[in-house]
Amino acid sequence: MRKIIHIDMDAFFASVEQKDHKDLRGKPVIVGGDPHGRGVVAACSYEARAFGIHSAMSCAKAHQLCPQAVFIRPRKDRYAEVSREIMMIFHAYTDLVEPLSLDEAFLDITSNTCNQPSATLLAEQIRSEIKTSTGLSASAGVSYNKFLAKVASDQNKPDGLTVITPNQARSFLMQLPIRKFFGVGKVTEQKMLRRGIRHGKDLLRFSREELVAYFGKNGSFFYDIVRGIDNRPVQAHRTRKSIGTETTLHTDILEWQQVLELTVQLAEKVGSTLQRKKTAGKTLTLKLRYNDFTTITRSRSSQVGFFSTSDIYPLLQPLLQTTEAGQRKIRLVGLTVSNLFDPQTLPICRQLMLPFIQELSPPGKITEHSEHF
């Protein structure tokens, strides 16, 4: 049986700021945008959470809830630096580390460098080492699969450890609120509540076929996890699925030309990233959020692929024409290339000299033709 640990740093971005700036300790700290602008909360300290503030909330709303909060602009390079230090600690125990983000990861320590059979003791040791090395606290969940380990890490935050053994799994899952289940967002939660599914014990009443009928392919996943079944391995090397960028505007824009110019700017960023990372993608997606917060996406695929900004440009106007840009005010624009692949895996196209070229060309001149097959 596998032994999985899920480590989740506590209020990571805000905690890094409080660690680096002693005057912020004990204060409600919000990492995000301008409280008087259009930004959102990227992270907040536990002192700020006491006021009902949470990530993805508008900074303006957060300021209303807690006027005395200290707003900090994100320092992504600093967070990445601390994250690398934490990941190095993980890799000292096992090669099977699957980062989910800068501040959390799964570790499969079934086999580990310490030859320690107790996953609980290892989790405590790792948390202690993180504290000593970075001055930050982490919460951990320990169980026999990824789903239970991740749920467990959220049970005793901050700076806590929760262990769910195989014998404890059933009773734990029966009492678990449905919103705590992996894959259950706000929309799915409402669908479940309408069917009387409030806890794991309610979900257990439905057959696999019924759940698939109600929730599509996720229904089969829900059927398994409520029974403590999750065979997903810890993947040490995760493949990046997309490259994109988006921007929330300080003021809503209506003019078509302004929206187009903004998509061009985003295309330059995405194209530059594709070339820097030496990758390409098959699908281009435009994302717009209107001023009433309605969000829409429009996508186009290319068999050849998107390798750079010049490949993206031709599709910007056609994509925009399928939206209400120019008719409705827009507050957010995003652009993403997905279905990534390695350009080096494509067949090499060579210029071929056809046998009859010299006969058809004037003496002393050879006309070259190239074809991509």
Image (spheres, rainbow, N blue to C red):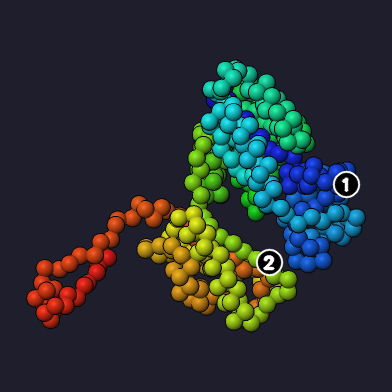
Residue 157 picture location, percent across and down = 76, 36
Q: Amino acid at mark 2?
A: Thr
Residue 322 picture location, percent across and down = 52, 75
Comes first in the chain, label 2 or label 1 = 1
Can see residue 362? yes
Instruction: Classify 10 Å Cα crowding around label 2: few (below 14), some (14-19), many (20 and above).
Output: some
Near-viewer residue (112 or 167):
112
Residue 257 quadrant: bottom right
Residue 294 is labelled as none
Residue 213 picture location, percent across and down = 52, 49
In the displayed orientation, state which residue is furthest to the left: 359
Near-viewer residue (140 or 278):
278
In the displayed orientation, state which residue is furthest to the front: 364
Q: Which residue is mark 2?
A: 248
Question: Of discs 2 and 1, which sits in the foreground?
Answer: 1
Residue 136 picture location, percent across and down = 75, 37
Residue drawn 72% across and 32% down?
Answer: 133
Q: Look at the numbered disc 1 and give the secondary structure of its residue.
A: helix
Residue drawn 58% across and 71% down?
Answer: 265
Image vertical order of residue 76 relative to residue 352, above or below: above
Residue 23 is labelled as 1
Contact, CB < 8 Å: mark 2 with mark 1? no
Near-viewer residue (202 or 259):
259
